[in-house]
Amino acid sequence: MQSRSSGEAPASIGQPIDAGARATFTNTIRLRLRAPAKLRNLELFLVLFACIIVGGSIALVQLGALGTIDPTVLIIGTSLGVLAIAMHVVLRFVASEADPFILPVITVLNGLGIAEIYRLDISRKVSGWESSGIRQIAWTAMAMLIAIAVILLIRNHRVLQRYRYVAMFVGIALLLLPMLPVIGETVNGARLWIRIGSFSFQPGELAKIALAIFFAGYLVTARDSLSLVGRKFLWMRFPRARDLGPILIIWLAAMIVLIFQRDLGTALLYFGLFLVMIYVATGRASWVVLGLTLFVGGALVASQVLGYVGGRFHAWLDAFNPTVYQAQGGSYQLVQGIFGLAHGGLIGTGWGLGRPNIVPLAESDYIIASLGEELGLAGLFAILALYLLFVSRGFRIGFAGQDDFGRLLGVGLSFVIALQVFIVLGGVTRVIPLTGLTTPFLAAGGSSLVANWIIAALLLRLSDSVRNQPRLVVE
Amino acid sequence: MNKELKRVSIAVLLMFIALFTSTTVIAVFQVDTLNGDPRNVRTLYDGYSAERGPILVDGQAVAESKPSTDQYKFQRVYSNPQLYSAATGYFTLNQGNTGVEGALNNYLSGNANSQFFDKINSIITGQPPKGAAVTLTLNPKVQQAAWDALGGNAGAVVAINPKTGAILAMVSKPAFDPNVLASHDTKSVIAAYQQLIADPKHPLFNRTLAGDLYHPGSVFKLVVASAALDSGKYTPDSEFPNPATLPLPGSSTSINNAEGGSCGGTPTVSIATALRLSCNIPFAQLGAALGANEISRYAKAYGFGQALKVPMSVTPSFYPQNTDQAKLMLSSFGQDEDRVTPLQVAMVSSAIANGGNLMQPTLIDHIAAPDLSVIQPFQQKVLSQPISAQTSATLTQLMVSNVSSGAANNARINGVDVAGKTGTAQNGEGRPYTLWFTGFAPANDPQVAVAVVVENGTSFGNAVAAPIAKKVIEAVLSK
């Protein structure tokens, strides 16, 4: 029955076809049908490989820092491997043509982060729920389950475009949530957290997803009016006020975050995301220049007016100056982090054999310096290459996608990851002033993990639709 | 949209290239300064938690790291602390390192570039990291003989094998106990260090190659004689007027010979006799005739004013060049602004002993990795050739008669031709002398060149320094 129908298909075009050509055509169709299975098999292989790397890392941490193997942590870690494979199985059924590299890359990154956080726990001699490592494992499990739910719930990403204004309000609400009196909480001088009972969360992390969805949806509908309509002033064309309105709202929101929540990094992240998405959508380089000028100008003014911003600038430019080094809120952490990286050198001290615990916040803001110390420049390059791979897979959606909303969203989400890595590692290595941001997938912190796994789930969903578009493959 | 995407991709790529660059700059190019920063406590902990390599003399460890129970894992122990303190120096938690401990810190701690693959190897095999073992050229018998012979005097002894440059003995007194400074109790280390620094006898000085330097006195006549004979303008028989006192030009003072009177009582005196009896007036005349430039040229060839590492840095010895006639005369017999290290004086003897070839002096026999493979073998090198073989033969003859029938007769050894020169340097009116002996033996096949200096002397170099040198030479020759 099957063979007859496939045999009949070309005949229906109405041309006589010989048996040989018919067989070739059938084979092509078979190849197309098998390709997704190949992709998923590749993913499975890579996920297993990722699990081996992570398991090996945890074992080496124990050998390096404890001197023995402690099976309980390895067993708990294995449950995450099981979840990664569960996610892979879900992808097999609901997104069979999704990108095969995204899941393995984030599994490795997340696992390396857990290994390093666990290693810092050992040097602090904490265990149970006291230890950030155990909490990180729990958060990872939750983040993976949420990511699976996202893949299962959002079968077609175009739905998201419909809720763009909802996303905008959700995003702004999430941003402003920590400023509420009772539940808002100030940690290390930044008011970014909400706390309900013993449960604390950084809603700003989720806001970036909402905002990316809003930008993508809004820009796809408004790009023509933004780029074509408007008055020309000097050498630039300015859009109409009603087209510009939402953009100004977001800019204000970013500035509010900067001033009231004392968080330079997040403000820079939102602003960068916004600029890149508007540039990709409209092709207006002059707006990027304008936006960057606004931000740099704002930051310079802030460095003069706001004490804590000025302190960051000082610590950045003159880190090794003894007075800056010893000052309250000075460059102590920055300099110790750089010492850690130098201590690691080319090949690192090895898992569990460095002294990353000397640096304050070694497991969150400074996880990358901790990893750099123990895995060396070689390990850092590998981690950076993994991020680059992740981002390039996201950009691939932008290049190869079929609908503009999906393309913009894919670019926006992956650019957020790239920019976040740059802001964090650039801050640690003194490329830019140090701002407090989490390193995606690596750093300790539940909200960041959940947000980044949702980003990964969305990218997987988007990449599946890229592949799913009918394409003429008959050669 | 694709054009914009491409540009954004390039921007992302540039961001990552910036990160690759910044991490590389930190972890590769700035590594040495960052690891050397005193605020970097990791280096401090590391310096103690890896097993530091031992310092060996003739196969026996004079400094080694033994397991300790505290946070630093290892304790530095010196088995014969005072005797070898000049060579080993000290290794402290936070007061710096000196001597071989300081100069070869990278090798001992296992951080030298040549140990990179050993480091990787120890990572792969899971062996704890370990530093390289440094074997010194010191000969324990000679070192002990020099130590004993110097007795309670403040001073120094250096013995060199003139054919190789290997330093056989390096003694500086008073010495110190590096064990006290190697303690992990920072407070007691600082207290002990302050006490050593405050000691007027300066036990932390390595007098053989640094410290306050000495007036060479008459041993500098060897350099002046080298310049005279090697230039071809003079022979040992060249005669000079022989007055009992010589007024210094442009000055109301005059100079005398050490023994008083003229040099040997004849109306004129030869260079040979002047050297044998160590007379000042003929050498003042000879120096004035040669000129400061000519003497300076030879002094430089012997190592004066040159930076040298053995592997510790040697303070360069000094000969004043731009000076008036009076000062030139004074500096021609080792007074005025002449300043030397005992090592420099031993180098002069060593070059004369070795046919005019000055070998680079060194304390390092070889450096071996923990697996006993040699990282750095003994490095024998000709530093310079200050005088010709012929001049060296002539000078040797003069120095031998100096010992056999001259002012250095206390260094005489039965059956061995010892070449030598004494010195009794003045340090100013009413201040004690600096007593010198330098020489080598046997004259026909030199095995050792030696320099002895004794501070705060009240008699002559021949009386105090020559017998010390004799014991050192005997220790070398009796093996």
Image: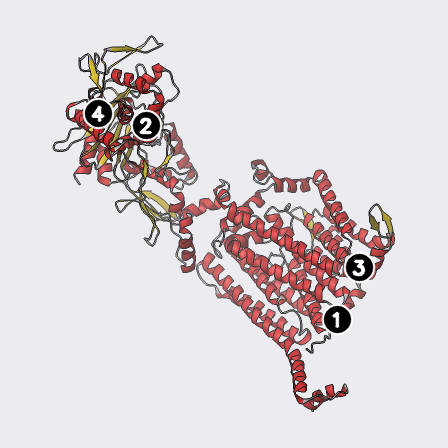
Q: Which residue is mark 1?
A: A156
Q: The residue under label 4 is which amino acid type?
A: Val
Q: For the residues marked 1 and 2, what is the alpha-carbon distance in whole angstroms?
A: 92 Å
Q: Looking at the picture, does residue B470 appear above or below residue A310?
A: above
Q: For the residues marked 3 and 1, what is the alpha-carbon distance in whole angstroms?
A: 19 Å
Q: Position of residue B73 (x, y in %)?
A: 40, 49
Q: Which residue is mark 3?
A: A219
Q: Is residue B413 left or right of residue A318?
A: left
Could you tell me which residue is drawn at 61 percent across and 41 percent down? A330
Q: In terms of sequence position, does the residue under pointer 4 or pointer 2 come before the other? A: 2
Q: Chain of mark 3?
A: A
Q: Residues within 10 Å of mark 1 (few under 14, many from 20)?
A: few
Q: Which residue is mark 4?
A: B464
Q: Residues within 10 Å of mark 4 (few under 14, many from 20)?
A: many
Q: Chain of mark 2?
A: B
Quadrant occupied by the N terminus of chain A = bottom right
Which is closer to the viewer, label 4 or label 2?
A: 2
Q: Residues within 10 Å of mark 3 (few under 14, many from 20)?
A: many
Q: Position of residue A113 (x, y in %)?
A: 57, 59
Q: For the residues marked 3 and 2, what is the alpha-carbon distance in whole angstroms?
A: 85 Å
Mark 2 element type: helix
